[in-house]
């Protein structure tokens, strides 16, 4: 960037940039403003309030370093002698830089004083008498503060575990008491039912005895004759025979009987379909007829897979081993249809 020196009007090749520094100042040397280093012991001319006024910042409240830096950069762009703006002024820029250094110095001293105060508090806390540490953690544990804290945590865990065990024990006792009440109530109900049943039986027995005394059972048909209900199987249990007769009269069939009937109906349907389809095809079969026969066999194969699963279920529930069935094969069924 080409800049024109304001003193000698000579063209200088000088890159424009703004340097934020607290140890440099701008002084005119041979008509050109250059930076000169400031000694660390240089006295700051402006007070904090005056520095805020020069930086165009309100004096109320604490300003952060970022706010102060933004204000300084904004004014430096206006008053820097090499900025090339109409407001460029070396004296005003020097005041701005001096005020910026004053604010930074004040902030640095404030920060150091705060750090020093914190250090003093830590030293005072460390210098506390050793026995005062034991006022915390309920006086439990020994050793360093970190060790005592871990020991106190373990003690709290043990206390919590004991409380949980006590709670569970009380719950078990309460449940056992409730279960005992339920058992006692069941016993009372069962005893009550038994008493009612016995009373009904005694009443029925008394009525039968009264009828027999009056001679109501003397005119019954078949009196004095042997029972002929079990002549087909004299070794059968009368109760089992009566139960089977009742189930048969009401149309009940065991599950294995129903499954056996379903299997027989399914295989009969499959065989009929194969027989009818093969009869419609010629002998020998044409390529088209062979394709149709192949498709039919694939469909029958899927049906036989389902049927064989039904056979497996039937073999698990059939009462006699001799009544079990074997799986159906597609090749055997095809040969049966061809023959």
Image: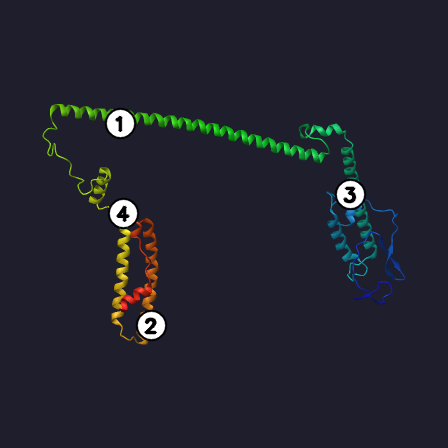
Q: Nearer the viewer, mark 1 or mark 3?
A: 1
Q: Can you give x and y, in whole percent of width and height, for residue 302 in the image?
A: 34, 62
Dot 1, how many residues are within 10 Å of its Cα: few (below 14), some (14-19), or many (20+)? few
Q: Which residue does the numbered mark 3 point to in the structure image?
A: 111
**Gap in angstroms between the C-alphas marked 1 and 3:** 98 Å
Q: Earlier in the sequence, mark 3 or mark 4?
A: 3
Q: Can you give x and y, in whole percent of width and height, for residue 15 in the image?
A: 80, 64
Q: Which of marks 2 and 4 is in front?
A: 4
Q: What secondary structure is marked by label 1?
A: helix
> Residue at left 73%, top 50%?
66
Dot 3, how many residues are within 10 Å of its Cα: few (below 14), some (14-19), or many (20+)? few
**Gap in angstroms between the C-alphas marked 2 and 3:** 97 Å
Q: Earlier in the sequence, mark 1 or mark 3?
A: 3
- Residue 274, compared with residue 98, is above or below; it is below
Disc number for residue 254? 4
Q: Quadrant of residue 286?
A: bottom left
Quadrant location of the N terminus in the rendered image: bottom right
Quadrant location of the C terminus in the rendered image: bottom left
Asked whether the beta carbons under mark 2 and mark 4 sit within 8 Å of each other, the answer is no
Query: As rendered, which of 56 and 272 lies closer to the eye?
Result: 272
Q: Which residue does the numbered mark 1 point to in the structure image?
A: 197
Q: Residue furthest left?
A: 219
Q: Nearer the viewer, mark 4 or mark 1?
A: 4
Q: Earlier in the sequence, mark 2 or mark 4?
A: 4
Q: Can you give x and y, in whole percent of width and height, for residue 287 in the image?
A: 32, 76
- Residue 9, compared with residue 285, is above or below; it is above
Q: Which residue does the numbered mark 2 point to in the structure image?
A: 291
Left or right, 92 with respect to 226, comes to: right
Q: Earlier in the sequence, mark 1 or mark 2?
A: 1
> Residue at left 60%, top 30%?
159
């Amino acid at each position: 960037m080409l800049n024109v020196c304001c003193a000698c009007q000579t063209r200088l090749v000088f890159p424009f940039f703004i340097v934020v520094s607290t140890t440099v100042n701008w002084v005119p040397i041979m008509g050109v403003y250059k930076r000169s280093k400031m000694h660390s012991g240089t006295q700051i001319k402006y007070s904090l309030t005056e520095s805020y006024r020069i930086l165009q910042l309100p004096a109320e409240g604490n300003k952060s370093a970022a706010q102060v830096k933004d204000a300084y950069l904004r004014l430096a762009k206006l008053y820097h002698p090499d900025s090339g703006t109409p407001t460029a002024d070396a004296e005003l820029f020097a005041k701005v830089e001096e005020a910026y250094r004053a604010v930074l110095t004040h902030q640095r001293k404030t920060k150091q004083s705060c750090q020093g105060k914190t250090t003093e508090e830590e030293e005072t806390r460390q210098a506390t008498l050793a026995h005062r540490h034991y006022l915390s953690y309920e006086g439990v544990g020994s050793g360093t503060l970190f060790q005592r804290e871990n020991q106190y945590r373990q003690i709290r865990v043990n206390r919590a575990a004991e409380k949980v065990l006590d709670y569970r024990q009380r719950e078990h006792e309460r449940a056992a008491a409730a279960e005992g009440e339920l058992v006692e109530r069941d016993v009372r109900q069962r005893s009550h039912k038994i008493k009612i049943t016995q009373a009904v039986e005694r009443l029925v027995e008394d009525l039968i005895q009264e009828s027999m005394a009056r001679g109501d059972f003397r005119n019954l048909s078949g009196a004095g004759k042997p029972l002929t209900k079990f002549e087909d199987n004299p070794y059968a249990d009368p109760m089992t025979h009566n139960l089977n007769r009742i189930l048969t009269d009401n149309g009940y069939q065991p599950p294995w009987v129903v499954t056996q009937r379903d299997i027989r109906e399914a295989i009969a349907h499959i065989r009929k379909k194969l027989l009818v389809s093969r009869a419609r095809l010629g002998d020998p079969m044409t390529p088209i007829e062979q394709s149709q026969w192949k498709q039919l066999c694939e469909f029958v194969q899927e049906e036989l897979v389902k049927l064989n699963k039904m056979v497996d279920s039937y073999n698990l529930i059939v009462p006699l081993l001799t009544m079990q069935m074997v799986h159906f094969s597609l090749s055997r069924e095809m040969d049966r249809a061809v023959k």
